[in-house]
Image (cartoon, rainbow, N blue to C red):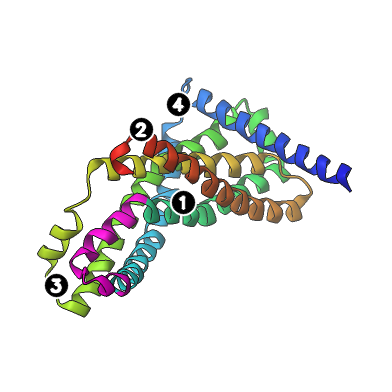
Amino acid sequence: MYARVGAAILAALAEVGEVSLFGLRALREALLPPYEFGEVIRHVYEIGWKSAPLIALSGFAIGIVLSMHTRASLERFGAEAMIPAGLAIALIRETGPLVTGLLVSGRVGAGIGAELGAMKVTEQIDALEASAVDSFKYLAVTRIIACIIAMPMLTLIMDFCGIVGGYLAESTISGMSWQLYFQRAFSLVEFNDFIPATMKTAVFGMIIGTIASYLGFSTTQGTEGVGRTSTRSVVLASMMIIVSNVVLVKLIFFLFPATG
């Protein structure tokens, strides 16, 4: 039993190492010509713009729920005036970036894994190589860069829609004007709250694109393997986002003490 457990741990660590090398190779290739700007823009549209409705609706709903929960807590202390600021800080610092990462890993990670996996098992990737096309750069690097670019923009949408949802809930309950709500919401928010939390989602995008592309390029066993790749892309990307978020939050607190 111990031998099996040890073998499983070693296999997991080996896969982590392979994914890390895959991502580092992608970053290096992104800096070298030729540059596939057209493909990157197309994937930013597919990943970013087409994910925007999901992110906006989710952010709006989360803002309403957070506002109601925040009110239930702060009413006990007579601090209802802090509801907008508490909601804005919670969304911008942590809830918005993390929820955006998990939603995009579900929608985009599964799509990239399945798409590249299908291309792998149907030998379309081999056909690209035979046509003198760098399949790694054309298929993987462009998707990874697009994920890195799209994630901060989607996080901004999540934050904005969450604050608007919070305003709707608060104005319905207390009748607060939108001028007063937004004045209070941003009264305690500083750039040290906003910039690091938003930029860390670029790391989430790197994780999503790298894991999904790696698993897609490693797909075997036909259509069954494609389904397994899609599922593993979502699960592994979500797990790594949660784990990396812990490290990134600690790093942000170290580099920007004012946010602690």
Measured Cα–Cα span from mark 3 to mark 2: 36 Å
Say whether disc 4 or disc 3 marks the residue closer to the N-terminus.
4
Do the residues under discs 4 and 3 have CB atoms within 8 angstroms?
no
Mark 4 is on which residue type?
Tyr
Q: Which mark is residue 176?
A: 3
Q: Which residue is mark 1?
A: 101
- The quadrant holding residue 196 is top left
Do the residues under discs 2 and 1 have CB atoms within 8 angstroms?
no
Q: Which residue is mark 2?
A: 255
Measured Cα–Cα span from mark 4 to mark 3: 51 Å
Observer able to see residue 135? no
Q: Is residue 90 left or right of residue 8?
A: left
Q: Nearer the viewer, mark 3 or mark 2?
A: 2
Q: Which residue is mark 4?
A: 35
- The quadrant holding residue 84 is bottom left
Above or below, comparing residue 238 to residue 143 in the picture: below
Q: Who is closer to the viewer here, 30 or 203?
A: 203
**Magenta segment includes 76:** yes
Where is residue 58? Give x, y as percent. Answer: 39, 64
Mark 2 is on which residue type?
Leu
Measured Cα–Cα span from mark 2 to mark 1: 22 Å
Q: Nearer the viewer, mark 4 or mark 3?
A: 3
| Magenta-tinted stretch | 72-93
Q: Nearer the viewer, mark 2 or mark 1?
A: 2
Secondary structure at badge 4 equals loop
Where is residue 195? Give x, y as percent. Answer: 30, 40
Label 1 neighbourhood size at 10 Å, few (<14), some (14-19), many (20+)?
many
Secondary structure at badge 1 equals helix
